[in-house]
Amino acid sequence: MALESYIRIMKAYTKMDEASGCWLYTKSVCPATGYGRIQVATKRMHVHRISTAYHHGLDLNNSNEFACHKCENRNCWNPDHLYKGDNHSNQLDCSNAKTFAKYLQKNAVIGSKSNGVVAI
Ligand SMILES: [Zn+2]
């Protein structure tokens, strides 16, 4: 499937966060990682990688190229909030933006409401 087709599907399931400018993919978010994901047939891909491929030339078949976030929303696919990076910049992205910590914190709060588990 061409990247344009993925982008078209992603647009149909995106909520714009006006405060941050983030494009939040709402159709499917991986509970373990917080990344928005799209599945077509048997192929499942992260929406931020598709956006980075389409807008910034990321090679989806190259595992050494990473789609890094400038913002703190892992399911954001706004091309202005993404850049193509390598493993080093991806590590810096994770530690500087604290995206995963924020995601875990948000999920812990949601978890405490739905199943009685108390966030630590
Ligand atoms: Zn964003």
Image (cartoon, rainbow, N blue to C red):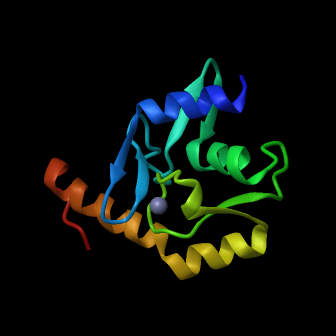
93 vs 79, nearest the viewer = 79
Q: Quadrant of residue 86?
A: bottom right
Instruction: Look at 43% across and 50% down and name the residue there.
Output: 23
Provide residue 99's location: percent of width, then percent of height: 47, 69
- Point 19% across, 65% down: residue: 118
Q: In the rendering, at what x and y percent does residue 51 appear?
A: 63, 46
Quadrant occupied by the N terminus: top right
- Against 11, residue 16 (above or below) is below
Marks counted in the figure total 0
The x and y percentages for residue 97 are: 51, 77
Q: Quadrant of the C terminus?
A: bottom left
The residue at 57%/80% (across/down) is 95
- Residue 34's place in the image compared with 41, above or below, is below
Name the foreground residue: 1 vs 91.
1
Compared across the picture, whether 73 is left or right of 55 comes to left
- Measured as percent of width and height from the top left, residue 61 is found at 83, 42
Of residue 20 and residue 69, the one placed in the foreground of this image is 20
Q: Is residue 104 left or right of residue 5?
A: left
Residue shown at the point (43%, 30%) measured from the top left: 12
* Farthest top residue in view: 41
Q: In the rendered image of this protein, does residue 56 appear above or below residue 68?
A: above
